[in-house]
Amino acid sequence: MKKIVILIALFVTFSINAQVKTYHPEREKINNLIHTKLKVDFNFEKSQLNGEAWITLTPHFYPTNKLVLDAKSFKINEVKVNHKKAAYNYSNNELTIELDKTYKRGEEYLIYVNYIAKPEEVIQKGSENITDAKGLYFIDPKEEDPEKPTQIWTQGETEASSCWFPTIDAPNQKTSQEIYMTVPSKYVTLSNGTLINQTDNKDGTRTDYWAMDEKHAPYLFFMGVGDFSIVKDTWNGLNVDYYVEPAYKDVAKDIFGTTPEMMTFFSNLTGIPYPWDKYSQIVVRDYVSGAMENTTAVVHGEDAQQKKGQLIDANEWEGTIAHELFHHWFGDLVTTESWANLTVNESFATYSVYLWYEYKYGADKAAAHMYNDIQTYMQSGSEDKILVRFHYHDKEDMFDTVSYHKGNAILHMLRDVLGDDAFFESLNLYLTTHKFGTAEAHDLRLALEKVSGKDLNWFFNQWYYGNGHIKMDVTYDYNTINKTVTVNIHQKEKVFKFPLAIDIYEDKTKVRHQVWVDATQNSYTFPINQIPKLINIDAKHVLLAEINDKKSLENYIFQFNNAPHYLDRRQALEAVIKHQQTEKEALNTVIKALNDPYYEIRVLALENIDLFQKYNKREAIAKIENLAQNDPKTLVKAEALKVLGKLVDPIYKPLFERGLESESFAVKGSSLISLYQIDKNAALTNLEKISDEVKNNLPDAVTTIYINEKDKTKLPYIAKNVLKGMFLTQNQRTQQMYGEAFKWIAESDNKEAIENLSNDFVKLGLQYKKYNFDKMAVNMLNQMVYMQQQANNTNKEELILILKTSMAKLIE
């Protein structure tokens, strides 16, 4: 599963809740699932499912005469064992069935359950800490909301599949499946495996029969129903389909079209061809997480559906597509045996994005992605958490930045320790050994050790079963008489063992030294001919570490110009930027960064270049003009247009007006805001010509203009974007501007604006509840209630009710 993680620390207040952490082992296996057959239809009026289940099981080891199935918020109509009515007890979301005899291991028996699933009555913690992980979701089932299509979809992870069919809802169970879904004929369906046949019924419904012979965990079962366009693709003779809303049919391949190439890449990488019978992806409304790796039937949240103008700038969902696909090896083919070992699912899926970017777009793109993931972990306040942890408050707590982002960085270090050949051959052995079964982190270690011949307990003990990350200070001692330099490594707080690459540059000659760090204090002496221009610690940039290595401005300038890694250039540029006002060479380095081969470095330089200093202003502006017109990346063009707008020079008006004609939303938005800074009337005239659909994809530019114009007739639009401006930026001026707009909305009598803002609070509050944003949202809604009470609005009682209703949703 792909979670959405906040990157800006300002947005959230991290805290450690005083919760009792209980030991959670792998679930005991008393009976094993073998096969699950379901027949279902849907009560749209009540948001319920009518179901029949035939479940084949066998005792795991010990003889048993009893079976316990998970069945949450069901009405049980009938239970049979081997076609005969059976005694049962249903309580506490468990269906306990008395078998017709004592069964021994290897003896199969068949359970039949006739039931009604009532997901609206489910109360359990689930994805992103929402409190209603109800497994089965009806979206606008009565067709009352003109803004939403009617859909049905399921979400099983962690243990919510038992909200719509009876099962042993644990990741260490595996079952084959078949599902008969009866739906109104106007809808299409999707489930795991292959669509075997479709039968038209006389009552205006149709029954679709889906089956999958290979076994997978119950949490990976999926059903989707709705009005979708199916865009077809193929891979090696297998169906690869993209289910999207009809409005996105023409861009479906722009969004998902790299999927077949990914399937080839991951098949080659693991040495195991994609192991399932088809691959489908579906985009649904109101999804409770980012995406989910249901076997052969991946579900994506609606943000996956992007317009052409967004996709020209960047397919923001491509990493998620790779993540969920790689789960079909790590998570679906071989599944964590317990939620404590979630790393064998999620860390690999997260690392797959790095692997894909490295293959498809090169080392810089992959390194930039890894840097962002590591920053997410570093800002999360999660140092005390262990990667494999059996003690937690709730299984949902495992779905965090440690299991995802830190685990991703740990795999990258492990790959470096072993080398590519041993690392990937080990993954093949792990997958082959445990295919269609379950595993834990120790199984991964044993596979790695068997292939490499190395003992890896030291690595797993500190990274998988220990917390924290490397923190070290680095100092240097130069001996000009003996012509040596001594590098001193001092680890703070906790001692880690790790290999370390140190590059020493004399002029432009580089010598790499590999050392082993294993103590609080380690010192290493190397020969030199002269004082080095740069000593680059962790030169391969593979360590999960905070390194305090004081360098001079000259060191950083040399590093930018000579050290090859993306992080060498990024870190150097971030340091050099601070000296533009006083050091000419610093500015020259920033100007040089405008020509960097990787676009994110060019964007970083544009975001920070100082055009109001005394050096080389003309040369810098000439380069920025060239980028605004000719850079191959629209995101660079857009940033260059923003910079030119700050010059408030009418000479650029034609350039900005041409930018408004661009297909790129980024270029269009930057052009609009820059035009506004030199000719407000022209910008406002052009803004009126832009369709509402396009305006909704230019939120930063349009909202900024509306706020600056103090146009309170646009409060409903502003309200949809105000929280992002207040909390997802570190620019104080922007925060101030959006804060003022928040005040307008809070004091206004504009019902639509109040509804939009309060709905946004609820959405984000529930989505980021584990970061305590729900508490912040309640406080701010309370503030809005107070401001309404003080306002002279005739409808304030109605508005206060809206705000209090939103507060109640966050508190419940």
Image (cartoon, rainbow, N blue to C red):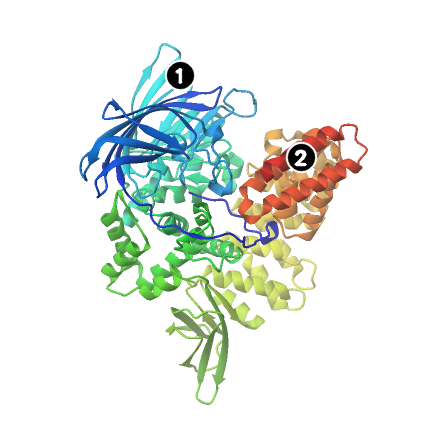
Numbered circle sitting on residue 185: 1
Label 2: element kind = helix
Look at the image and tell me whether residue 712 can be seen: yes
Q: Are marks 1 and 2 in contact (CB under 8 Å)?
A: no
Label 1: element kind = loop
The correct choice, above or below, for 513 with respect to 375 in the image is: below
Look at the image and tell me whether residue 720 can be seen: no
In the rendered structure, the answer to whether residue 274 lies left or right of residue 610 reads left
The correct choice, above or below, for 484 with respect to 366 in the image is: below
Query: Real-space Cα distance between discs 1 and 2?
Result: 41 Å
Query: Could you tell me the amino acid type at mark 1?
Result: Ser
Residue ID at (57%, 22%) = 146
Q: Position of residue 204 (x, y in %)?
A: 40, 12
Residue ID at (67%, 44%) = 779
Residue nearest the observer in this picture, 428 or 141: 141
Q: Quadrant of the C terminus?
A: top right
The correct choice, above or below, for 113 with respect to 205 in the image is: below
Residue nearest the observer in this picture, 97 or 769: 97
